[in-house]
Image (spheres, rainbow, N blue to C red):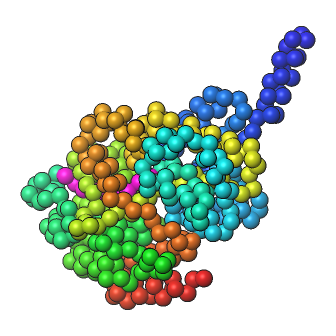
């Protein structure tokens, strides 16, 4: 009886000594299930830390919840910060610097990361973010429809526009235009432009931006495109899988869902069309530690991140989410995965011309004005240049 009592007291003591790391993320579906599994495996692998996972909604919903939690002092230890929101958190002093932790990493481990995602977490000379999920936009298309009309997979914007028109019929449109700043940004950077100038000013009315929106407007005017705002993203997915639209741009992370539901046709995936020298914006999120976290909570969050970065866990993560692998040494481990579907490697290799999203704190607000401009022009019939100039003016007024 005494031994049993001692064992129970010992277990209680261990539980009370365990450091809890709360983790808010924005991954649902197979990716969310993978995060749950990683947390359970990590918790079982050691006794010092316990990661408690919470799905906080999509990126925009999670941002709203975090802002509210910061006001009330109820923010989590670890948070998945979308890379457009990350600079704002740094600027507002909401994050804990992580240099003391990353200084302990093996240099060979650091060198194994692709430079763009590894460097993104550094701002103002300090590291605030740890790379976790990196994506690029891709073109999803109905391969059967293109093949039936003997159309090439578009690699430049003229071919894309021509294909969209030729794929349009009485019952379907050639293209589903999702009115999202990141997708639009891809249309701008792929033309050699940028939504933000080198000195950090909005650049919404640049020639490349106007050219991109005018192209979208032409397709809408010719009834070759269905415009869908972010609130209608579920309808956009249904439009595509029900063959009401033949092409759509979305994150590479949307691939598992598209593959699951596109049973009526062969799903084609291709890089974003681009002009010579054009780039594609890197998407995804950083893992950040909120400023109110204790030293031990921060250490626990860091240990969990290191656990996520194990090659076998990155492989499991890529297979569940289709995000881009962060470490070079992991790519050979994914050969079978990429060989299963030739489209996978083509889309993944797009990372070689990926560029970071704008690292300006105000961009988290500016992008809302850009979303409004897209909707005003493509659903409200406002002149493309005028819509972008209006968004530019509003962005310049943000302090």
Residue 323 in view here: no
Q: Position of residue 85 (x, y in %)?
A: 55, 65
Residue beneath the point at 69% across and 43% down: 299
Q: Is residue 39 above or below residue 399?
A: above
Q: Position of residue 163 (x, y in %)?
A: 16, 66
The stretch drawn in magenta includes residue 135: yes
Along the line of sight, the residue nearer the viewer: 56 or 211: 211
Which contiguous range is marked in magenta?
A: 134-143
Left or right, 71 with respect to 35, comes to right
Along the line of sight, the residue nearer the viewer: 167 or 184: 184
Residue farthest left in this picture? 150
Residue farthest front in this picture? 107
Left or right, 278 with respect to 322, comes to left
Residue beneath the point at 60% across and 47% down: 102
Q: Quadrant of the C terminus?
A: bottom right
Main SS, magenta residues = strand
Left or right, 135 with respect to 144, comes to right
Residue beneath the point at 72% across and 62% down: 70
Along the line of sight, the residue nearer the viewer: 387 or 305: 305
Residue 291 in view here: yes
Q: Quadrant of the N terminus?
A: top right
The stretch drawn in magenta includes residue 248: no
């Amino acid at each position: 009886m005494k031994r049993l009592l001692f064992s129970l007291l010992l277990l209680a003591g261990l539980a009370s000594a365990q450091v809890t790391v709360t983790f808010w993320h924005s991954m649902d579906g197979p990716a969310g299930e993978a995060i749950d599994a990683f947390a359970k495996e990590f918790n079982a692998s050691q006794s010092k830390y316990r990661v408690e996972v919470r799905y906080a909604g999509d990126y925009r919903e999670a941002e709203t919840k975090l802002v509210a939690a910061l006001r009330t002092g109820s923010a989590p230890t670890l948070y998945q910060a979308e890379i457009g929101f990350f600079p704002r958190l740094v600027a507002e002093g909401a994050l804990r610097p992580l240099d003391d932790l990353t200084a302990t990493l093996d240099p060979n481990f650091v060198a194994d990361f692709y430079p763009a995602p590894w460097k993104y977490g550094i701002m103002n000379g300090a590291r605030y973010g740890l790379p976790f999920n990196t994506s690029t936009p891709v073109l999803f298309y109905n391969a059967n429809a293109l093949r039936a009309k003997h159309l090439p997979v578009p690699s430049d914007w003229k071919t894309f526009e021509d294909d969209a028109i030729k794929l349009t019929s009485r019952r379907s449109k050639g293209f589903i235009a999702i009115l999202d700043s990141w997708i639009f940004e891809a249309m701008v950077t792929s033309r050699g432009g940028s939504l933000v100038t080198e000195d950090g000013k909005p650049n919404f009315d640049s020639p490349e931006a106007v050219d991109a929106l005018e192209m979208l407007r032409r397709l809408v005017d010719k009834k070759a495109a269905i415009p869908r705002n972010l609130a209608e993203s579920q309808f956009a997915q249904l439009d595509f899988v029900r063959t009401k639209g033949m092409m759509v741009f979305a994150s590479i992370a949307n691939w598992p869902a598209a593959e699951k539901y596109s049973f009526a046709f062969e799903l084609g995936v291709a890089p974003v069309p681009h002009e010579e020298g054009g780039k594609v914006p890197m998407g995804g999120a950083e893992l950040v530690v909120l400023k109110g976290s204790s030293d031990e909570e921060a250490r626990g969050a860091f240990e969990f991140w290191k656990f996520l970065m194990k090659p076998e866990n990155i492989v499991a993560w890529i297979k569940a989410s289709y995000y881009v692998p962060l470490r070079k040494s992991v790519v050979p481990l994914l050969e079978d995965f990429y060989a299963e579907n030739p489209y996978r490697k083509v889309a993944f290799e797009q990372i070689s011309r990926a560029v970071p999203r704008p690292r300006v704190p105000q961009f988290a607000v500016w992008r809302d004005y850009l979303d409004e401009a897209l909707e005003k022009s493509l659903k409200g019939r406002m002149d493309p240049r005028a819509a972008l100039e209006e968004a530019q003016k509003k962005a310049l007024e943000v302090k």
